[in-house]
Image (cartoon, rainbow, N blue to C red):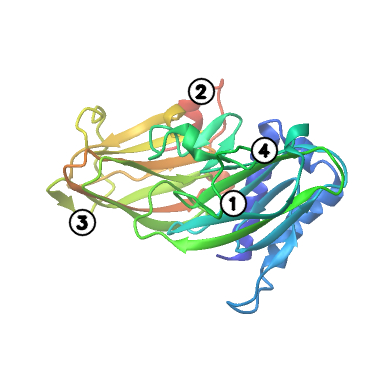
Amino acid sequence: MAVSARIHMLLLLISLLSRLGLGRYIEDNEAAEGLYSMLSLEQKRSSEDFIFRRPLRCLDMLATEGQFTFMAAQPQLACAAFLIGEPTEVISLELSDVNIDCSAGDFIKIFDGWVLKGEKFPSSQDHPLPLRQRYTDYCSSSAPGGAVLSSQNVAMVFFRIHSPDSGFTLTVKKQHNPMPCNIMSQSPEGSFTMVMPHHHWNCSFSIIYPVELQLTELSLGQAKSNELSPQRPMRWGCTGSGDYVELLGGNGVDTSKMYPMADLCFSPSGLTQMRMGCDNSVVRLVSSGNYVNRVSFRYRLLGRSEQPQASENSLDDFCTVG
């Protein structure tokens, strides 16, 4: 992925964290400069055998493999590292050289997904594991040893450390995911195909940008449409069919709390493309497990002049451009 796209994503994440009340982590210039320079540093990997190493910050975002070491210079009571891979990757996380005092309230927790202001991605409706099983607590006696593997291309590490010179090292590796489901896009433009073969699972592709979205292929059950033109509108009321595609928009990350902008449960001769002006635009494939379902789509970032202006706090007006 281009450096400019990663910088765009990082800036958007910083903006989102600020709106969610976490801006205190990026208020000092040194920390902010570190976040901006992080991406250029990650480009210095010269070979597959090279192990990339750098310090881990209290608020950080990791998009590459490597070893990341956190060492507290002062009490750090609310820290988080967001990890993201390519859509077809899952993330392996392993802790080492841990020097924290669990009895004093220190902790390190790994979460299978992302959490922002209490909202979780993937949502509890879409993730294959119960919520309590998505947390791995280093200080818990039941915490498994070895690496923790995410279910999708995002994961998160929460940590709190009271004493200076305490810390840990986090080793991040990526693995190929042969059947990606519940994806957070790194890029503001691209294309993707979600396939669900005879599993009663729901899969979401989340794009944390305002985008123009166009479905290019849809196969639900036995029906299939390979060439979909933008002349025919989508249909509402498919949620009872068991197999359908939803387009969702909102300003958080939990798909169960997002605004349903359209749904589709049949293969028409035409399909509308849509401009979605939300902070988060989602394509969600709901499957009954009775069929092999498939949806393909393209998306691109909306230009500044294409993005809507909010009117009277109406999410409908703000998210839907046309």
* Gap in angstroms between the C-alphas marked 4 and 1: 15 Å
Measuring from the top left, give residue 110's x and y in whole percent.
59, 44
The numbered mark, 3 or 4, whose residue comes first in the sequence reads: 4
Determine whether the residue tagged by mark 1 lies in a helix, strand or loop. strand
Q: Residue furthest top?
A: 312
Foreground tag (4 vs 1): 1
Determine whether the residue tagged by mark 4 lies in a helix, strand or loop. helix
Nearer to me, 115 or 305: 115
Q: Amino acid at mark 3?
A: Asn
Which dot marks residue 17?
A: 4
The residue pinned by badge 1 equals 83
Asked if disc 3 and disc 1 are in contact, CB closer than 8 Å, the reply is no
* Gap in angstroms between the C-alphas marked 2 and 1: 32 Å
Badge 1: few (under 14), some or many (20 or more) residues near its Cα, within 10 Å? many
The numbered mark, 3 or 2, whose residue comes first in the sequence reads: 3
Nearer to me, 5 or 294: 294
Q: Amino acid at mark 2?
A: Ser
* Gap in angstroms between the C-alphas marked 3 and 4: 39 Å
Asked if disc 3 and disc 4 are in contact, CB closer than 8 Å, the reply is no
Which dot marks residue 314?
A: 2
Determine whether the residue tagged by mark 3 lies in a helix, strand or loop. loop
In the rendered structure, the answer to whether residue 2 lies left or right of residue 149 reads: right
Foreground tag (3 vs 4): 4
Visible in this render: residue 251? no
The numbered mark, 2 or 4, whose residue comes first in the sequence reads: 4
The numbered mark, 2 or 1, whose residue comes first in the sequence reads: 1
The residue pinned by badge 3 equals 226
Badge 3: few (under 14), some or many (20 or more) residues near its Cα, within 10 Å? some
Measuring from the top left, give residue 73's x and y in whole percent.
87, 47
